[in-house]
Image (cartoon, rainbow, N blue to C red):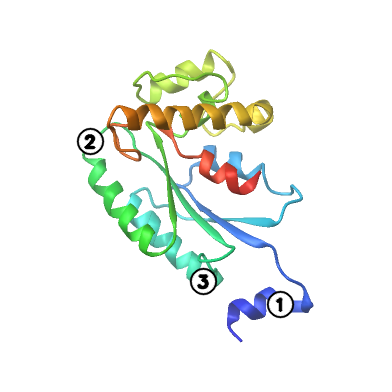
Amino acid sequence: MSIRDRQRNKGNRKSKRVILVSYEGNNKTERNYFDSFKGIEKDYTIKVVFGNETDPVHLVNQTIKKKNDLGLDLETDDRAFCIFDTDIDPRKNIQIKEAIEIAHKNNIRIITSSPCFEIWFLLHYEYTTATMNNDDVIKRLKTHYFNYSKNCNIYPFIVDKTKEAYKNAKKLEKYQKDNNRIIQSVEANPHSDVYIIIEEIT
């Protein structure tokens, strides 16, 4: 019996499936958001990869290590996600492409937001195709939620708008594809794949 099987069958009880999530560095914005899903009675447990990595490739490698340490089976019920921003520098496309290739070989899903994670929050309030930098996104977000600041927990104020954000994100993805922009690239600005995780945890 494998370590994973022993862990799953300890006490003759089947453990919940694991959803592993990794973020860039010590970014509390994403952590606060996903931590808010913990404690909800679901069939999963959210585990976080703690570290200081900000480079997409290193972040994926860090996730692979954690996945192996936990003995996760990503081909069946467990899931692993790497979340990072595309930012606006086209040179980051090289890092993103390499990270995607490594992640794919290890059944890890890459989740990007362009230019930053806050675009996912903004999509709870409105649909927009305007190209923006990080400051632009936050400024626009503040027109809806004045008290927003980096690392605050906005979840309680947007949770009832999650379905709207999901719909807007899917619509925005179609818009970018229709305009021949590669999703998960700097050029697909704005966009957010966070809805993919939401499909798993809601």
In the rendered image, the quadrant that contains the N terminus is bottom right
* Tag 3 residue: 69
Q: Secondary structure at mark 2?
A: loop
Q: Residues under labels 1 and 3: Cα distance?
A: 17 Å
Upstream in the sequence, badge 2 or badge 3? 3
Q: Residues under labels 2 and 3: Cα distance?
A: 34 Å
* Tag 1 residue: 9
User: Which quarter of the figure has residue 184?
Assistant: top left
The answer to whether residue 178 is visible is: yes
Above or below, 65 against 81 in this view is below
The answer to whether residue 154 is visible is: no
Q: Residues under labels 1 and 2: Cα distance?
A: 47 Å
Please name the residue shown 57% across and 20% down the image.
Answer: 125
Do callouts 2 and 3 mark residues in contact (Cβ within 8 Å)? no
Q: Amino acid at mark 2?
A: Pro
Whether residue 117 sits left or right of residue 76 in the image: it is: left
Please name the residue shown 26% across and 41% down the image.
Answer: 92
Q: Amino acid at mark 1?
A: Asn
**Labels 1, 3: front one:** 1
Above or below, 49 against 170 in this view is below
Q: Nearer the viewer, residue 108 or 65?
A: 108
**Labels 1, 2: front one:** 1
Q: Amino acid at mark 3?
A: Asp
Upstream in the sequence, badge 1 or badge 2? 1
- Count numbered badges in the picture: 3
Please name the residue shown 44% across and 58% down the image.
Answer: 108
On residue 90, which mark appears? 2
The x, y position of residue 139, in whole percent, is 46, 17
